[in-house]
Image (tube, rainbow, N blue to C red):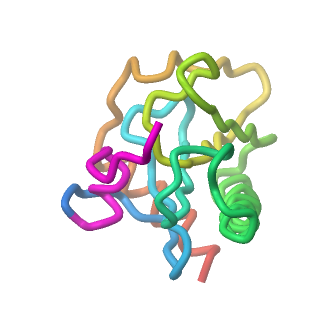
Amino acid sequence: MAYDPDNIFAKILRGELPAHKVYEDDATLAFMDIMPISRGHVLVLSKAPARNILDIDAADLARVVAVVQRVARAAKEALGADGVTIQQFNEPAGGQTVFHLHFHVVPRWEGQPLRPHGAIKADPADLKRDAEQIAALLV
């Protein structure tokens, strides 16, 4: 399938929809997931118009993965998490629901189960607070 430039993440990248930004450079954007599976759940996107890992240029993928690592370290430290889960889904059979390459950076705490994906919309004030705490370590 071809890349759809009207997907929700493309609209966020163009500034047509709001997001609680954590980090941005010329190749990537990281922002809070509005329906997090854990506190501090961040999405890291490539700015390249790629559906998923199967069709992105290797150089663009390398740049986004480097930011995933930086965001994971910052989220773990900023929120005092015990660990971090990184998720990335490809095509409907692989669990992908938004067809723009993105990674989920999910802080984890011992004994705390993940919430179901897309089940609970977070309070915008909580997202803003967590975004600011994580972003402060990425300057």
- Looking at the picture, does residue 85 appear above or below residue 139? above
Q: Given the current orientation, which residue lies at the most extreme front position?
A: 1
Q: Is residue 7 magenta?
A: yes
| Residue name at image x 68 percent, y 36 percent | 87
Q: Is residue 79 magenta?
A: no
Q: Which residues are magenta?
A: 1-15
| Residue name at image x 56 percent, y 32 percent | 38
Q: Position of residue 49 (x, y in %)?
A: 47, 59
> Secondary structure of the magenta portion, mostly?
loop
Q: Given the current orientation, which residue lies at the most extreme left position?
A: 16
Q: Quadrant of the C terminus?
A: bottom right
Numbered marks: total: 0
Question: Residue 138 vs residue 70: left or right?
Answer: left
Hey, which quadrant is residue 93 in on the image? Answer: top right
- Looking at the picture, does residue 50 appear above or below residue 99? below
Q: Position of residue 58 (x, y in %)?
A: 75, 63
* Nearer to us in this view, 29 or 130: 29
| Residue name at image x 42 percent, y 47 percent | 3
Hey, which quadrant is residue 69 in on the image? Answer: bottom right
| Residue name at image x 68 percent, y 21 percent | 112
Question: Residue 4 vs residue 92: left or right?
Answer: left
Q: Position of residue 72 (x, y in %)?
A: 71, 55
Q: Position of residue 70 (x, y in %)?
A: 72, 66
